[in-house]
Image (tube, rainbow, N blue to C red):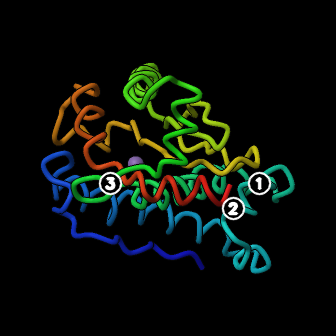
């Protein structure tokens, strides 16, 4: 059985970048629903219930066909959101010099990286995510697809589904992204980069 992870901060702690209303809805309703539907899909397959979510998402092709899409969407939703909560922190935090060095090497400076990442996020048509990968490349995925399915552990992910920002920003995705940079937990991203 998969479980909704607890947040390391209160629902209102990321405000005004992300309001308490959005955080509560996003975590306790949207993410909870992914967890519930993932568990429902695995009900008939007890052997799969104790596998790490990373393993399920890396072996989608080997899963029983009747649950493959449900695991891809809801397992992906569970994995992606679990990372998303961790890479945010009230007030944001700073990258280590090691990670900053890698970013600078690839992009020149942090501001240029942020600008490229933002452009990628604005380019996601409909619902999806934008990611920073361990090789310092930026990529996007549609729906709840995740780089983990390709065997790549993402370091930073931004949810650009409308449910992530519509209550606060209506349709204005650029304002959401601009505010989001202020709550990025760069020390967590650095920690993940070190492990990758
Ligand atoms: Mn979401």
Element class at badge 2: helix
Residue in the image at 16% along x and 52% along y: 19
How many discs appear?
Answer: 3
- Residue 42, by quadrant, is bottom right
Relative to residue 53, is residue 108 depicted above or below?
Answer: above
**Dot 1, how many residues are within 10 Å of its Cα: few (below 14), some (14-19), or many (20+)?**
some
Name the residue beneath numbered marker 2. Answer: 54
Q: Extreme right residue here? A: 62
Q: Nearer the viewer, mark 3 or mark 1?
A: 3
Q: Are marks 3 and 1 in contact (CB under 8 Å)?
A: no
Relative to residue 36, is residue 164 depicted above or below?
Answer: above
Residue in the image at 73% along x and 53% along y: 68
Name the residue beneath numbered marker 1. Answer: 58
Q: Are marks 2 and 1 in contact (CB under 8 Å)?
A: yes
Seen from the viewer's position, the closer of residues 48 and 118 is 118
The quadrant of the image that shows the N terminus is: bottom right
Element class at badge 3: loop
Element class at badge 1: helix
Residue 80 location (% of width, % of height)? 52, 53
- Residue 32, by quadrant, is bottom left
Residue 48 location (% of width, % of height)? 76, 73
Left or right placement of residue 19 versus residue 111 in this view: left
Left or right placement of residue 114 versus residue 9 in this view: right
Residue in the image at 61% along x and 35% along y: 136
Name the residue beneath numbered marker 3. Answer: 93
Left or right placement of residue 104 versus residue 181 in this view: right
Seen from the viewer's position, the closer of residues 83 and 66 is 83
């Amino acid at each position: 059985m998969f479980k909704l992870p607890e947040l390391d901060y209160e629902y209102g702690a990321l405000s005004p970048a992300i309001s308490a209303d959005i955080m509560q809805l996003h975590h306790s309703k949207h993410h909870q629903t992914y967890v519930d539907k993932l568990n429902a899909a695995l009900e008939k397959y007890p052997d799969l219930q104790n596998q790490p979510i990373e393993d399920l998402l890396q072996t989608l092709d080997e899963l029983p066909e009747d649950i493959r899409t449900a695991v891809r969407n809801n397992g992906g939703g569970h994995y992606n959101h679990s990372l998303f909560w961790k890479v945010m922190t009230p007030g944001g935090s700073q990258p280590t010099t090691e990670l900053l060095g890698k970013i600078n090497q690839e992009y020149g400076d942090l501001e240029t990286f942020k600008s490229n990442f933002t452009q990628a996020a604005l380019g996601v048509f409909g619902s999806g995510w934008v990611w920073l990968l361990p090789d310092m490349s930026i990529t996007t995925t549609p729906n709840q697809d995740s780089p983990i399915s390709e065997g790549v552990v993402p370091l930073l992910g931004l949810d650009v589904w409308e449910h992530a920002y519509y209550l606060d920003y209506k349709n204005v995705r650029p304002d959401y992204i601009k505010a989001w940079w202020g709550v990025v937990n760069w020390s967590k991203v650095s920690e993940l980069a070190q492990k990758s």
